[in-house]
Amino acid sequence: MNQVNPIPGNIMFDGPMATKGYPLNKMCFSFNNVQARESFLANEDAYCESFGLTEEQKKAVKNRDVIAMLEAGGSIYYLAKFAGILGLNVQDVGGLQTGMTTDEFKAFLVQQGEK
Amino acid sequence: MATIMGGIATSHIPAIGVAMDKGLEQTPYWKSFFDAYPPVREWLYSQEPDIVVVFYNDHGLEFFHDRKPTFAIGAAPQYENADEGWGIAEIPPVTGETELSWHIVNQLIEHDFDITVCQEMKVDHGLTVPLTLMWPGHQYGHIKVIPIAINCERHPMPKPSRCFDFGKAIGNAIRSYPGEQNVVVFGTGGLSHQLDGQRAGFINKLFDLYCMDKIVDEPEVLTKLTNFDLIEKAGSQGVELNMWLAMRGALQGKLTERHRSYHLPISNTGAGLQLLATSDAVDVNQC
């Protein structure tokens, strides 16, 4: 994958990022299972610890900081399962990453059809 | 020999499944999107398909990074779906097919595509949303489905040119299968969207329309793109065009475009629907 000219605002999820993000993504993969979601909600710190998240990943999870989770190696497909626990949809997550409210983000999506 | 009647490319956005569950099809947000589907369904039913081959990507339901295949095919009598963690409703199991699956596997290996074979696998919204769109009310039980998963999540992922050739090899395999089955091929996902990063919300209508234009008679133009090009032009999840290219690769000869429509935004995405009939299709009125 040519990353000579990185795309602004895009965090390429490649092999090294998958290595870095493995514990975080593995935890989020577990959220396919409802019991796992309940365990996380019952004791978030212990649940993160049981997957061996790095300090950077734990902090990003605690702060619900999507960009920090991506930078810590999170893959959006697994983070979406985490967002589900928080009751957030992909427009909410879009807003969180771009500094917009959900309504502003939705309006932004509509605007792109008007170009 | 088995016959490929045509290919259908459709978005597989989870929100579509949720909207169908809630009966929102005729609400202002959704109406024009859902109104595009009845003519495509009408054509599909007129072909009396026995088997549907679905190119899709798993979004972290069946495959995790501990063992993530680049290309995988199901060879199971049945496929379950599941709650994916954010509340998509579970739907009845999908009927599988094993004999044609194994034939495809043998032919793929013979032609240097060393594919992963799954005799048990869960299928996610990438496969179930298109099935539900084509057979509303979950009336797809009579159709035998062959799931084919392409890695679109973690780089490196197969190149557009490789996905097109992969589809070609599968098309050739289907056409060499001794039987009278009618087969339709689905390419699911896309078109442009980006869920992650500060670039989230990126959609490129002009590029999407260009892809829908070229895929009919000049798909080779699209196979010259790299995955990096796709991310740049269509967003990080725009690489799902690779499933459309695999579908297109499976079709050969003179094609008739029977339907094309595009809606933006559906969720965070430019949602395309396209129907390409082969010369073997049963002739019906223009959709």
Image (cartoon, rainbow, N blue to C red):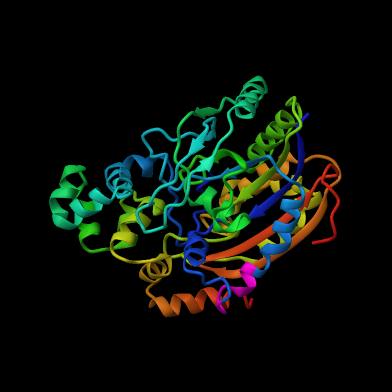
Question: Could you say where residue B68 lies in the image, as x and y percent from the top left?
Answer: 44, 35
Q: Compare residues A14 and A2 and report the one nearer the observer.
A: A14
> Was residue B30 drawn as part of the magenta stretch in this picture?
yes
Looking at the rendered image, the quarter that the C terminus of chain B falls into is bottom right
Question: Could you say where residue B189 lies in the image, as x and y percent from the top left?
Answer: 57, 53
Question: Could you say where residue B99 lies in the image, as x and y percent from the top left?
Answer: 62, 26
Q: From which residue to which does the magenta span run?
A: B27-34
Against B81, is A6 above or below? Answer: below
Q: Please give the name of the residue rendered at 58% of the width and 75% of the height, measured from the top-left corner.
A: B26
Relative horizontal placement of residue B185, taking residue A19 as reference (left or right)? right
Residue B211 can be seen in this image: no
Relative horizontal placement of residue B2, taking residue B263 as reference (left or right)? right
Residue B181 can be seen in this image: yes
Tell me the quarter of the picture where residue B264 sits: bottom right
Q: Please give the name of the residue rendered at 57% of the width and 72% of the height, measured from the top-left corner.
A: B30
> Was residue A11 drawn as part of the magenta stretch in this picture?
no
Q: Compare residues A25 and B8 and report the one nearer the observer.
A: B8
Q: Compare residues B203 and B251 and report the one nearer the observer.
A: B251
Q: Give the number of callouts.
A: 0
Relative horizontal placement of residue A82, taking residue B237 as reference (left or right)? left
Q: Compare residues B187 and B200 and report the one nearer the observer.
A: B187
Q: Please give the name of the residue rendered at 62% of the width and 43% of the height, measured from the top-left corner.
A: B143
Q: Please give the name of the residue rendered at 78% of the width and 28% of the height, measured from the top-left corner.
A: B1
Tell me the quarter of the picture where residue B248 sits: top right
Against B182, is A44 above or below? Answer: below
